[in-house]
Every structure is written in C-alpha cells, then in structure tokens.
Image: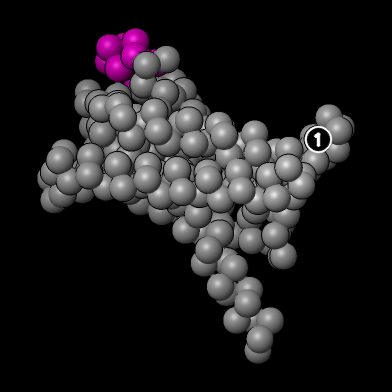
Amino acid sequence: MVLLFDFIISLAGAIVTLFVILDPIGVLPFFQSLTRSATDEQRRKIARKAVLIAAGLLLVFAYLGNIILTLLGITVYDFEIAGGALLLVFALRDALSNEPLGVTETSQAADAANSMKALETAAIIPIATPLLAGPGSLTSVILLTKQPYGLILAGIAIVADSMLAWIALSASNKMNRFIGPSGLLIIGKVMDILMAAIAVSYLTKGIQGTGL
C-alpha cells in the first residue's frame, strides 16, 4: 500500500511537471494563428498529428536518452545543470515575450498556412517541435527516468500529457471563446513562472550532485 501511494504521488508529480513544460495552453495562441485558414476538421487533424509526433519524440528521448548520455560520457548531474539552465532561459524568454517559443524562427509559417500541405507542415514544425517537444520537455523526460519507477513514470506521463495537449489543441476555438486571448496569455505566463521554478530545481540538484 505504501509503495502504491508513493508511486501515485510520483506519477502525479511527473505528469504535472511535464504538463507545465509542454505548456499546451501557452501554445494555443500560436496554434490558432497557424491554423486560422483551417476548418474545424482540419484543425483537429493537425492537432492529432502534432501531438503524435511530439509524443514520439518524447518517448524516444525517454527510453534512449540515457544511452545517449552514456555514449557522450555525460553524467545526469551535468545534464541537469545544462538542461536546467537551458529551460530557465526559455522560460524567461517566453515570460518576457508576447509570442510563444519558436515563433520567431518560424514566423514565415503563419503566412504560408493557406493550404493543407502547409498546415500539415506546420503540425510538425513548429507545433510538434519546438513548441511542444522542445529542449525543455526533452530534457525533462530524460531526467524523469532517473527517478524511482523512472521509465514507467516517464512513459505514462508522456501519454497522459499528450492526451491533454491533444484535447487542448482540438478545443482551441472553444477555449479561445470561453477564456479569451487575455485569459490564455495570463495562463501562459503563469506556466512560464512554474517552468522557471522547475528549471531552478534542476540546477540546484545538478550542482548539489557534482559537489560544486
């Protein structure tokens, strides 16, 4: 019973942590902009494709990330410091910007999104990556595998949060009407603060682990 309770608590923490870093709510305004010429059916198709690709990338990094670290001779503490620093930069940049992460690098995509081919391309870049499966989330899933029940936790968290991201993107029109652009912006900024706090915790653990 104690082990089950411990597993449930760890799983809840993993799901919340990854959800904050995936930040599908913060991606909604950009998703709306990229798919403004799409029908509701096309938008749901784009959302499904983007989430499946993002989930695939996250699962690959969750189950092969440790092998990559070993081949490169990197310890988990090194990765925590590097990943925490990178995540902190992204969180601060996103918090101080009016655009989601990745929009600058792919600003032409919104202008080109006038055909289904262009829309499906946008589902891969930038929606699937880097907006959903970006450096922060890829870092996080590798670090999740280092916890007790790591591989199981990471796998379940990725599937659960991918489903939540799909629901959010598929219902983007309804959420936009219900919450409004200002509401989505506020939620996104709160997510940025939580993301920055998670980044600091990664940095702290990494520094403590290396004995600096």
Res. 73 in view: yes
Res. 165 in view: no
Observer-nearest residue: 138 or 162? 138
Relative height, residue 81 to residue 106 (above, below):
below
Relative height, residue 106 to residue 140 (above, below):
above
Q: Position of residue 9 (x, y in %)?
A: 56, 73
The answer to whether residue 139 is magenta is no
Relative height, residue 102 to residue 8 (above, below):
above
Residues drawn in magenta: 106-117
Q: Which residue is depicted at the point 44% across and 45% down?
A: 195
Q: Where is residue 155 in the image (x, y as percent from the top left)?
A: 63, 55
Q: Where is residue 36 in the image (x, y as percent from the top left)?
A: 22, 26
Q: Which residue is depicted at the point 36% across and 21% down?
A: 103
Residue type of the residue flagged with mark 1: Ile
Which of the image's four quarters has the C terminus?
top right
Q: In this view, does 61 lie to the left or right of 46?
A: right
Q: Badge 1, how many Cα within 10 Å: few under 14, some, many 20+?
A: few
Which residue, given by chain and number where applicable, does mark 1 sit on?
74
Q: Provide the major secondary structure of the magenta segment.
A: helix
Q: Which residue is depicted at the point 81% across and 35% down?
A: 74
